[in-house]
C-alpha cells in the first residue's frame, strides 16, 4: 500500500505547534517513515504554494493547519488545504479557537498598526510609515503584503474535521493523536481529539482525588501576589485556575510547574463557549460575590485563548464597525 500523504501549514502562529511535533523525537522518525510529507510550509520543507496548488484535489490524506487566520494569505491557504486534504485538522488552540493572538480583535487594525509602528517608546519612525498591502519602489517594482483581517478560527473559513487543543499541544498527546490517525481510530468527525478529562481530573493537587471536599474560594490573587503553594490546589488558594473546564491532554503541565491553568487545552467535551463556561465555573465557587471585583482584566483571563472563536466575537465586530463609521 502507498504511504498516507500528509500536509502541514503554519498560518498566524508562533511555530510552537511545529516544535511539539519535533519533540516527538524517535517516534517522529517512525511516523515520517510511515507517511509521505508532501507539504510542510513555511518551517520545514522548501515547497512553494504553486507546487501545492498543482496537486489533485483530495489527493492529500491528512492536513494539519496550525495558527489562526489573520490575513488574506492565511484565508487562501485554509481554502487550499481544505480543497487538497481529505481530512483537515485544526492543530493547536490558535487554529481551534483563535489563541492569544485572537485578543487583537479587541482593537481595529489601524489602532494596532499605530501602536506597533509609531506609539511605542522604543520605536524610531519619524516619518510615521505604516505597513501597506502594496508599495511601489522606483515607480516600477511593486511589493505586496497580505492584507490584514480580523483574527478568525479555521472553522470560520472552512469545514474542519478534527480539533487538537494546546498552546502548543503536549507532545505525548500529539503522539496519541498521530497513533490514532495512522490506525484509523479517530472519533466522529467534528470532534476534538482528546482523552476527554479536565485538567482537574489529572491534577495530583485535586483534593477530591485524596477523598477530600473542595473548599470555596475565599480570596482572589494574581500570581505576582504572595507565594504560590506547591502542594495545594491553586484555585482553593485563590489563584484563579481554569482547570475545571479545560481539557487535560497536557497532563496538568502548568500546575506541575506551579502555575495556574489558563485554558489553552480548549473546552472539555460538551462546552460550546469556553470563556462563558469559565466565568460560570469560577463565579460559582467564590465564597463572596464581592470577590468578582478583584478579578483583574476578566476578558484576558477567561477569553485568553478563545476570544476569536467565542460568541463575543460578533459583538466585538459590531463595535469595531461603529468606530469605523
Image (cartoon, rainbow, N blue to C red):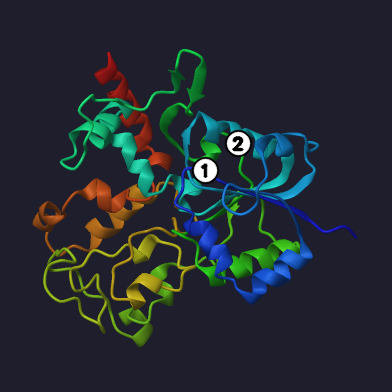
Q: Position of residue 64 (x, y in %)?
A: 62, 51
Q: Position of residue 3 (x, y in %)?
A: 83, 59
Q: Is residue 246 left or right of residue 1?
A: left
Q: Name the residue located 26 percent from the left edge and 49 percent from the top edge.
A: 300
* Nearest to N terminus: mark 1 or mark 2: 1
Q: Name the residue located 40 percent from the left edge and 40 percent from the top edge.
A: 308
Q: Secondary structure at mark 2?
A: helix
Q: Nearer the viewer, residue 224 or 306?
A: 224
As drawn, the label of residue 77 is: 2
As drawn, the label of residue 57 is: none
Q: Nearer the viewer, residue 112 or 180?
A: 112
Q: Residue furthest front?
A: 138
Q: Which part of the image, by quadrant, shows the N terminus?
A: bottom right
Q: Residue furthest right?
A: 1
Q: Compared with residue 230, is residue 291 higher up or lower down, i.e. above or below?
A: above
Q: Position of residue 104 (x, y in %)?
A: 32, 38
Q: Residues within 10 Å of mark 2 (few under 14, many from 20)?
A: some
Label 1: which residue?
Answer: 11
Q: Which part of the image, by quadrant, shows the C terminus?
A: top left
Q: Residues within 10 Å of mark 1 (few under 14, many from 20)?
A: many
Are circles 1 and 2 on residues that touch, CB within 8 Å? yes
Q: Compared with residue 216, is residue 267 higher up or lower down, i.e. above or below?
A: above
Q: Position of residue 187 (x, y in %)?
A: 66, 58
Q: Is residue 289 left or right of residue 114?
A: left
The Cα–Cα distance between marks 1 and 2, rounded to whole angstroms, is 8 Å
Q: Is residue 286 left or right of residue 29?
A: left
Q: Nearer the viewer, residue 254 or 53?
A: 53
Amino acid at each position: 500500500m502507498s504511504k498516507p500523504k500528509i500536509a502541514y501549514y503554519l498560518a498566524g502562529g508562533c511555530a510552537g505547534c511545529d516544535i511539539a511535533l519535533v519533540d516527538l523525537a524517535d517516534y517522529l522518525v517512525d511516523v515520517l517513515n510511515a507517511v509521505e510529507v508532501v507539504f510542510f510550509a513555511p518551517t520545514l520543507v522548501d515547497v512553494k504554494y504553486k507546487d501545492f496548488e498543482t496537486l489533485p484535489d483530495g489527493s492529500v490524506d491528512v492536513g494539519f493547519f496550525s495558527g489562526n487566520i489573520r490575513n488574506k494569505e492565511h484565508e487562501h491557504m485554509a481554502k487550499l488545504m481544505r480543497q487538497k486534504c481529505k481530512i483537515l485538522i485544526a492543530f493547536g488552540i490558535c487554529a481551534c479557537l483563535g489563541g492569544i493572538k485572537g485578543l487583537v480583535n479587541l482593537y481595529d487594525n489601524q489602532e494596532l498598526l499605530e501602536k506597533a509602528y509609531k506609539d511605542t517608546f522604543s520605536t524610531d519612525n519619524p516619518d510615521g510609515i505604516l505597513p501597506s498591502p502594496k508599495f511601489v519602489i522606483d515607480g516600477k517594482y511593486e511589493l505586496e503584503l497580505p492584507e490584514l483581517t480580523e483574527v478568525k478560527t479555521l472553522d470560520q473559513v472552512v469545514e474542519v474535521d478534527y480539533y487538537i487543543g494546546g498552546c502548543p499541544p503536549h507532545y505525548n498527546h500529539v503522539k496519541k493523536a498521530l497513533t490514532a490517525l495512522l490506525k484509523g481510530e479517530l472519533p466522529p468527525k467534528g470532534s476534538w481529539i482528546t482523552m476527554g478529562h479536565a485538567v482537574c481530573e489529572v491534577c495530583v493537587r485535586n483534593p477530591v482525588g485524596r477523598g477530600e471536599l473542595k473548599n470555596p474560594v475565599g480570596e482572589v490573587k494574581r500570581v505576582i501576589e504572595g507565594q504560590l503553594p506547591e502542594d495545594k490546589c491553586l484555585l482553593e488558594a485563590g489563584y484563579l485556575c481554569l482547570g475545571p473546564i479545560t481539557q487535560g491532554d497536557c497532563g496538568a503541565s502548568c500546575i506541575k510547574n506551579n502555575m495556574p491553568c489558563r485554558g489553552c487545552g480548549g473546552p472539555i467535551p460538551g462546552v460550546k463557549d469556553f470563556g462563558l463556561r469559565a466565568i460560570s465555573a469560577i463565579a460559582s465557587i467564590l465564597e463572596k460575590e464581592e470577590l468578582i471585583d478583584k478579578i483583574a482584566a476578566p476578558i484576558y483571563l477567561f477569553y485568553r485563548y478563545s476570544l476569536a472563536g467565542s460568541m463575543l466575537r460578533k459583538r466585538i465586530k459590531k463595535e469595531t464597525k461603529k468606530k469605523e463609521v
